[in-house]
Amino acid sequence: MIKKNSRIFVAGHKGLVGSAILRKLKEKGYSKILTVEKSKLDLTDQKKVHNFLKKNKPHFIFIAAAKVGGIFSNNKYKADFIYNNLSIQLNIIDSAHKCGIKNLIFLGSSCVYPRECKQPIKESYLLNGKLEKTNDAYAIAKIAGIKMCESYNEQYKTNYKCLMPTNTYGPNDNYDDLNSHFIPALIKKIHRLKVKNSLNLKIWGDGSPMREVIYVDDLADACVFFMNKKTNENLINIGTGIDYSIKDYAKIISKIILPSKKINIVFDKTKPNGTPRKVMDISIAKKYGWKPKSVFKKSIIETYNSFLKEVND
Ligand SMILES: NC(=O)c1ccc[n+]([C@@H]2O[C@H](COP(=O)([O-])OP(=O)(O)OC[C@H]3O[C@@H](n4cnc5c(N)ncnc54)[C@H](OP(=O)(O)O)[C@@H]3O)[C@@H](O)[C@H]2O)c1
């Protein structure tokens, strides 16, 4: 159980998820939060990571540092994805154990489940089938992290949990044209329509694929909740358990960004749809009393407001 004066290390505190965990911890009144700039501590450097943990001895670690990206970069920079992710998690998890740090949360991802997974996705489906080819290097690294936590728990009686978030959005997201996930990509595209005074929103595929998303504040809430919770399971899905079509997301976000306009959605059917449906079974998380609290429209408004600040910075 995290005490108000426990030392807590948030790795990757400037990213989408890490910054939300930091906000959540501050909101809950935890006072001894450790963060370190990437320029001062490159987490792929084993010796430096070990020295940092030995010196600072946090009681709890959240690993929100990772190399993360969309389909394009996952596919094009596989070596960077596998090397960076394996190194970061290997260094933090092993040094945490060697420094006697018993509590840690590692983040996996819904996209490391097999490509042709039965829906909704249960935790037990991990390694049940072939991975999606475009992100297999990233997925193998994440699965290694999951197995590492499991193995250290078994052998060394540590409490290293893996949360498996679905597609996440919120403040501090990545809006890079080639590298972003679909919610930030939609926000940016619709914002551009507003700037250009255009009404034609072009989206890939026919808009029918069903996707689940989670607001980053809910994910951060789950991270703190499960750090404080004794669980029998080591792997826990974090999502909403509810999915909507890409077309529905496009309509809702358009109404928020361009409230008085009637958007014309143009479907580029020459582009692939991807998996028809992707949604998590979150019954294990619910069994322990956790559920998401955010309302989609309100969360998109908050995300859009922070996008406007980020693009103006
Ligand atoms: N975003 C999603 O939709 C999603 C969904 C499921 C799971 N997740 C998981 O959640 C975790 C966090 O993702 P995110 O979306 O918050 O990613 P993010 O916004 O890219 O944040 C990752 C953070 O890690 C830092 N980092 C990367 N390499 C580092 C290194 N060698 N040393 C120190 N810091 C380093 C990054 O710093 P720089 O920016 O300076 O490189 C960045 O601040 C990841 O494990 C990811 O797999 C995310």
Image (cartoon, rainbow, N blue to C red):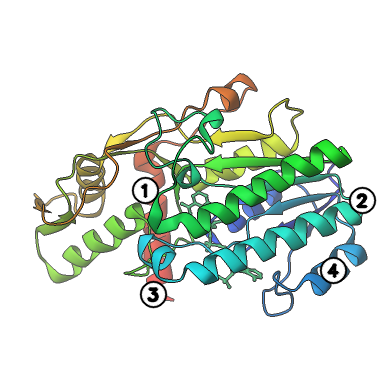
Query: Mark 1 or mark 2: which is in front?
Result: 2
Which residue type does callout 2 highlight? Gly
The answer to which of 145 and 178 lies nearer the viewer is 145
The residue sitting at 53% across, 66% down in the picture is 81
Mark 3 Cα shell of 10 Å, populated few (<14), some (14-19), many (≥20): few
- Report the quarter where the N terminus lies: top right
Q: Earlier in the sequence, mark 1 or mark 2?
A: 2
Number of the label disc, if any, that sits on residue 85 = none
Number of the label disc, if any, that sits on residue 312 = 3
Q: Position of residue 225 (x, y in %)?
A: 68, 35
Q: Image quarter for residue 92?
A: bottom right
- Report the quarter where the C terminus lies: bottom left
Which residue is disc 4 drawn over?
Answer: 52
Query: Mark 1 or mark 4: which is in front?
Result: 4
Query: Mark 4 or mark 2: which is in front?
Result: 2
Does the residue at mark 3 contact the one at mark 4 (Cβ under 8 Å)? no
Which residue type does callout 4 highlight? Phe
Q: Position of residue 35 (x, y in %)?
A: 73, 64
Number of the label disc, if any, that sits on residue 100 = 2
Query: In the rendered image of this protein, does residue 107 appear above or below residue 76?
Result: above
